[in-house]
Image: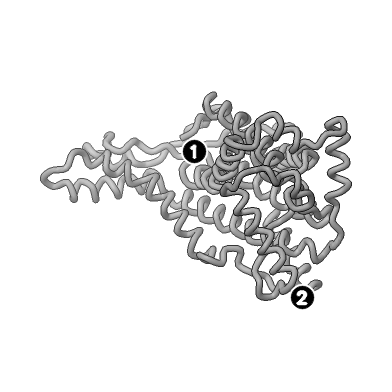
Amino acid sequence: MAGLGLATLTVVFSLLEDIPVQDPDSLIPGYIRFPAIVLGAIAIDVVPRMIAAAGRPGGGWLRRFGSAGRRVMRERWPLTHWRFALNGVAAWYLCYAAFRNVKSMAPFVHEKIYDEPLADVDRFLFAGHDPAATLHAWFGTGVAAHFFSAVYIVWIALVPVTIAIALVWTRHTRAGEWFVTAVAVDWALGAVLYVVLPTVGPIYSDPGTFAALPETYVSRLQESMWSDRVATMADPATAGLQTIAAFASLHVGIMVTICLVVHLVGLHRWVRIASWTFLALTVLATVYLGWHFFVDVIAGAALGAFAVWIAGIATGNRIGWRARLVPERINVATPVGGPASAGHPEALASRSAPLPDHPAAD
């Protein structure tokens, strides 16, 4: 529903502003890139299992590998999971493409920029001080800039990896659909906020505060994004999509979503600790590097938490109005190399088994 809502908003804005809807991935088209990502994730899921089941290389290894491959694919990828994964990826890409287009159109739909009042709110919250300048004083403007730049790079890769885990690698489909739906809600609500309260962020509205930071991957990216925005504002029909919008921080929002989901579905303790730690680093990085005001962080955290709750309701993961993973009955096949390989093909028939209330990662 979030994807359809965003797609509708994209078409409406396109007609109102006479701006074409564009593929958000101009270098490698999405219809090539995302199937490639899915196939790569599937290969990572099944190939190591096939190699392990085939045993040591030697006489007849290719035959054993082929036989193991067929068993692994039957166990790991029954038709039900193909439908779940492909439908999930298609819905996710629709939401992603629509989100990118709405974000790019936001400054045309609502031309006013609200950076100054948000900067005033930040200074009020920090007793008259600028949050970014405060972090520069605390952490310095040398090594810390490179460290927080690295945090930002990791975040960029984190979202597609978590989507791959939720749709391809896990067999707890109720947990997977809850997470993917929550991320879609993050994008949908974030896009609406970009239109309602357009901002560009401290790095662009107050560049002097960040002049002392060294050149990093992030600083080069910020310059590139501003060039894209200028080109898009001049000629939206041919320049591609611009990606600058600060309120609310979806970096923080999506990390809050990740943290809450891994807690609510009961993943391993080290995963929960790592998630919350990376959330804290993301908050510091977005403010330190000038991507967001601190009030953007607050709004992003609230958005991410709300997305988890509403997605839990939408996917049936709830008890009353309280979001909670509802155990499902999944197909559990005999492991490769079990009785089926000993001449009992009926052992491959699935049997129902309830999930625990807090399933661990597959």
Q: Are marks 2 and 1 in contact (CB under 8 Å)?
A: no
Mark 2 neighbour density, 10 Å: few (under 14) some (14–19) many (20 or more): few
Q: Give the amino acid type for the residue marked by disc 2 in the picture.
A: Asp
- x, y percent for residue 2: 70, 54
Mark 1 neighbour density, 10 Å: few (under 14) some (14–19) many (20 or more): some
- x, y percent for residue 100: 67, 59
Evaluate whether residue 189 shows in this view: no
Residue lying at the far left in this picture: please name it.
Answer: 59
User: What secondary structure is found at the residue carrying circle 1?
Assistant: strand
> Which residue: 64% across, 34% down?
279
- Give the number of the disc on residue 18: 2
> Which residue: 60% across, 67% down?
23
Find residue 282 and report its image quarter. top right
Q: Decide which of 67, 301 is in the foreground and name it.
A: 301
- x, y percent for residue 319: 70, 31
Q: Nearer the viewer, mark 2 or mark 1?
A: 2
Find residue 109 and report its image quarter. bottom right
Q: Give the amino acid type for the residue marked by disc 1 in the picture.
A: Ile
Find residue 277 and report its image quarter. top right
**Residue 207 against residue 56 in the figure, above or below:** below
- x, y percent for residue 314: 70, 44
Q: Decide which of 165, 354 is in the foreground and name it.
A: 165
- Give the number of the disc on residue 201: none
User: What secondary structure is found at the residue carrying circle 2?
Assistant: loop
Residue lying at the far top in this picture: please name it.
Answer: 269
> Which residue: 81% across, 72% down?
16
Spatial distance from mark 2 to mark 1, Cα to Cα? 48 Å
Say left or right for 150 vs 188: left
**Dot placed on the residue nearer the N-terminal end, 2 or 1:** 2
- Give the number of the disc on residue 330: 1
Say left or right for 131 vs 82: right
Evaluate whether residue 64 shows in this view: yes
